[in-house]
Amino acid sequence: MKKHIYIYSPSSAVRDKAGFKRGIKRLQAMGHEVEIDAAALSSHQRFAGDDQTRLAAIHRAAASGADMALISRGGYGISRLLPDINYKLVAKAISSGTQFVGLSDFTAFQLALLAKTGAKSWAGPTLGADFGTVDEPDDITQACFEDLISGQGEGCGWQLPKPAKPAHAALDTDAKPLTDKPYTIKDATLWGGNLAMFTSLVGTPYMPAIKGGILFLEDVGEHPYRIERMLTQLLYAGILGQQKAIVLAQFSDYKLVPHDKGFKFASVVSWLQEKVKAKVLTGLPFGHVQTKVLLPVGANVTLAVEGRDAFILWGHQH
């Protein structure tokens, strides 16, 4: 079914113009009508236009009447705009059927929108990185995208990683087994996004006050000690202790160094499990990776786990 997709750039400037064009053509080849914001390829310093230009682009996306407003890319820049966004305009667009989709820097927009209006948005792909690739887009990413825009998406599932076996006599053991007996968490708010962006909103009016939620987090280029440092801030701020589950998605593109001496991502997971009562899950296919599901930020969901099989279910969220 043909849908209207609005492409805009609220964060960093589009540097890969060829990828941008490929993404447009791919969406059109999927049968959709693609509308490109007038400032989508603007550039000012590292941004896709100055603050007023990008702010206006967000508001044009909200006024477009499109079925989906999809960002061209992430990067940085939305944090500067948060006080001036017309959240009521965006919430009205969402209630009229426009799905706002993105990730990375877009996390700041999604959390602020949720805090200010309670409106739901979708953590998902971007135009360039996911549809503008030289190779064909990832099958799962594309299928989840099509499910959302056609109104068919009802949940996602993944297999939890096998717990690593600790090295003999190691001082720092690997992650403990992530599951025991089957369990289900019902009617919990799904929220989260990029860990660095999420953490940057602590103590601001743009951080939702969500208790008993399911918090999902991802990041790129952050060493495990930096991940732990940000999680520590969320722990001390009282946010992690108020959640029923913490789902760690993909933390990609970092390098361990010799003086880590066995400290790695699994070490952070073990540390987190000891610090919170919430269920801690890993391996969710989402983040700065090719295979990503779409997740309804602000929706009430059910988390079900049996063995290594995990599911987040939301039914129709529109």
Image: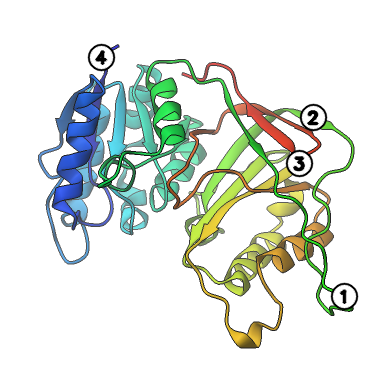
Q: Is residue 120 left or right of residue 57?
A: right
Location of mark 2 (residue): 184
Question: What mark, if any, has residue 168 been given in the picture?
Answer: 1
Name which of mark 1 and mark 2 comes first in the sequence.
1
Disc 1 and disc 4: Cα gap in Å?
Answer: 58 Å
| Residue 161 pos. (x, y %) | 70, 49
Q: Nearer the viewer, mark 3 or mark 2?
A: 2
Q: Residues within 10 Å of mark 4 (few under 14, many from 20)?
A: few
Question: What mark, if any, has residue 2 been given in the picture?
Answer: 4
Marks 1 and 4 in Cβ contact (< 8 Å): no
Q: Nearer the viewer, mark 1 or mark 4?
A: 1
Image quadrant where residue 166 sits: bottom right
Where is the N terminus found, in terms of image quarters? top left
Disc 3 and disc 2: Cα gap in Å?
Answer: 11 Å
Name which of mark 3 and mark 2 comes first in the sequence.
2
Location of mark 3 (residue): 244
The structure residue drawn at horizontal position 76% and vertical position 39%, both measured from the top left corner, is 308
Name which of mark 3 and mark 1 comes first in the sequence.
1
Q: Is residue 266 left or right of residue 119?
A: right
Q: Nearer the viewer, mark 4 or mark 3?
A: 4
Disc 4 and disc 3: Cα gap in Å?
Answer: 39 Å
Name which of mark 1 and mark 4 comes first in the sequence.
4
- In the rendered image, the vertical position of residue 233 relative to residue 94, given as above or below: below
| Residue 305 pos. (x, y %) | 77, 34
Q: Residues within 10 Å of mark 1 (few under 14, many from 20)?
A: few
